[in-house]
Amino acid sequence: MSLADTKTRKAVVAGLMAAGCLFSAGSALAQAIVVRSTGPSAAEYPQGRKLPANATVTLRAGDRLTVLDKAGTRVLSGPGSFALNGAINRDETAGSALASLTVRTPGARVRTGAVRGAPLAASTAEANAPDSVWYVDVSKGGTFCVADPTALVLWRPNRASEGAGKLLSADGSMADVAWKAGSALKLWPVASVPVVDGQSYTFSNPVGPTVNIRLKLLASVPSEDMAVASVFADNGCNAQLDVIANSAAPQASGG
């Protein structure tokens, strides 16, 4: 074999290896994540489970599986089998809702005073879930991934009247938290109760149950919705996966 042939062969092999790496990386990204799961098959498809590209899920009667893949977020209802191949076009409204949930803009709104007392809107209706994955829901608690510890926000579902509660850290530090009528958001009192990676906290108030909160600080935050959900799944931040699930567009039952 000539020197030229040897060089050509090496170049071809290198090209194939590079293509293989790209294919593997693409395959790793092209997966689905279970963001909510109820029904008889919930143990088989638990919240946070990652499914390989082009996976087929088989659901039984009474199953409702909310998944996020490259096609968007949607609800699958059993009985039936579903191919998660990304072929279903994302609903534009649902896609916009998901993008709004994951964008990291809450800190800017907080610093302008929206959380320090001024109501965000005239509406006093009770909401079912936060409108950002980066808010800590004090009505449910759970494990929360934190993008910016200096702009962490506490969220309450009912903004109709004034509200108050107490935030207590496992290290003994505590702070009183108060909302004005019409406001759902409040900055985490970092000066009194530091935001610490892996730390556990409790939040109590006179009108609801005491909830447990655990914080996981993120070194970096990806820009893609799918990658954000993957980070939540890896860190057990299921409360935030629940918020993503709320943006899902329903899908017809399988056959």
Image (cartoon, rainbow, N blue to C red):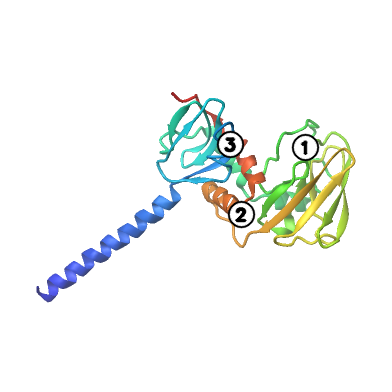
Q: Is residue 64 left or right of residue 149?
A: left
Q: Looking at the rendering, in which quadrant would you find the N terminus?
A: bottom left
Q: Is residue 141 left or right of residue 44?
A: right
The residue labelled by disc 1 is: 157
- Residue drawn at x 57%, y 53% as measured from the top left: 234
Between marks 2 and 3, how big is the CA–CA gap? 18 Å
- Indicate the amino acid at tag 3: Ser
Q: Earlier in the sequence, mark 1 or mark 3?
A: 3
Q: Residues within 10 Å of mark 3 (few under 14, many from 20)?
A: many
Circle 2: element type: helix
- Residue drawn at x 70%, y 40% as measured from the top left: 130
Considering every residue shown, the one lying at the far left of the view is: 1
The residue labelled by disc 2 is: 235
- Mark in the foreground, 1 or 2: 2
Circle 1: element type: loop
Q: Which mark is residue 216?
A: none
Residue 8 to residue 103: above or below:
below
- Residue drawn at x 45%, y 50% as measured from the top left: 29
Looking at the picture, how far across and down is residue 54, in whole percent? 40, 41
Q: Earlier in the sequence, mark 1 or mark 2?
A: 1
Q: Is residue 200 left or right of residue 51?
A: right
Q: Residues within 10 Å of mark 1 (few under 14, many from 20)?
A: some
The residue labelled by disc 3 is: 37
Q: Looking at the rendering, in which quadrant would you find the C terminus?
A: top left
Between marks 1 and 2, how big is the CA–CA gap? 25 Å
- Indicate the amino acid at tag 2: Asn
Looking at the picture, how far across and down is residue 186, in whole percent? 80, 48
Looking at the picture, how far across and down is residue 73, in whole percent? 53, 37
Looking at the picture, how far across and down is residue 15, in whole percent? 26, 62
Residues tagged 1 and 2 counted as in contact (Cβ below 8 A): no
